[in-house]
Amino acid sequence: MKFITNIFNFFELFFSILQGKGFAGFRVSLNFEVKYILKVLKKNKNLIALDVGGNKGNFSSILNKNIENSEIHVIEPSLINFKFLKKKFKSKKNITIANIAISNKNKNEKLFYDVKGSPLASFNKRLFLGTKKKMTGYEIVKCMTLHKYIVENIKKKIIDIIKLDTEGNELNCLISLSEKIKDIKIIQFEFGGCNIDSRTFFRDFWIFFKKNDFSVYRIGPFGISKLINYSESDENFLTTNYLAKNNKFF
């Protein structure tokens, strides 16, 4: 009986990934994310992009290779990662590195981590049940709203891309845009196990984007799938990437 259950579990996971649910857990998904973003924008030059939660800069690196004459801001709170990013993009004059965290308040917060520079670092002291991982330390980081960062650092009014990977704090980042939300063309965000710890549901994102007249798509290995209506089946905590398009521009 256990063998049969395991087979069903395997197929459940397999078909979920084909839908995009859990696909973001694979490194190759980064290439798909950039590919579909540029396909939606229908251009690959003179873009303004914010990589919020840049970690080691993998997303920005792939994006930079596929666009011309563009302005990229990599926002990363971890000090060790900030130093790594400064060195990595030292020769790239079009890439700005900011050592801050984005949240809905302009104040200092504890950023918990399992190891320094971890991609799992979060404002929530996550419980990795079923694994040996533990949040063993933290650093104090400066927080800033996206509205404040954009006003202080970006001259152009329209921003083409905001990518959010902040380990459960994505909704606060979105809220922090305030009225600037209307000037963003595309927002790509991650949803997964970290949202269990932050107690945020996909429904919260759905309501936010519908309120601001965005269409939401799930990114999968075969393309992007538009979500017509909210469903409880969307509350899947396998790491998944979504793309939200501002209907004002498309």
Image (spheres, rainbow, N blue to C red):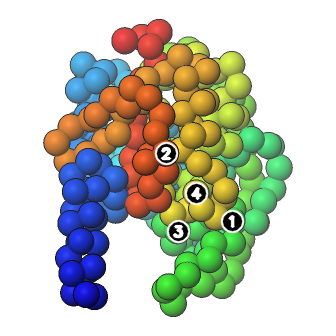
**Residue 205 visible in rendering:** yes
Classify mark 1: helix, strand or loop. Answer: loop
Classify mark 2: helix, strand or loop. Answer: helix
Residue marked by disc 2: 232
Identify the amino acid type marked 2: Glu
The residue located at (30%, 21%) in the rendering is 41
Residue marked by disc 3: 120
Residue marked by disc 1: 124
The residue located at (79%, 43%) in the rendering is 105
Q: CA distance from mark 4 to mark 1?
A: 10 Å
| Left or right: 131 in relation to 212 | left
Quadrant of the image for the C terminus? top left
Of the numbered discs 2 and 1, the one sitting upstream in the chain is: 1
Q: CA distance from mark 3 to mark 2?
A: 26 Å
Residue 228: x percent and y percent? Answer: 39, 26
Residue 204: x percent and y percent? Answer: 61, 39
The residue located at (63%, 72%) in the rendering is 126
Of the numbered discs 3 and 4, the one sitting upstream in the chain is: 3
In the rendered image, the vertical position of residue 188 relative to residue 121, given as above or below: above
Residue marked by disc 4: 195
Q: Nearer the viewer, residue 157 or 155?
A: 157
Residue 115: x percent and y percent? Answer: 55, 80
Q: Are marks 3 and 1 in contact (CB under 8 Å)?
A: no
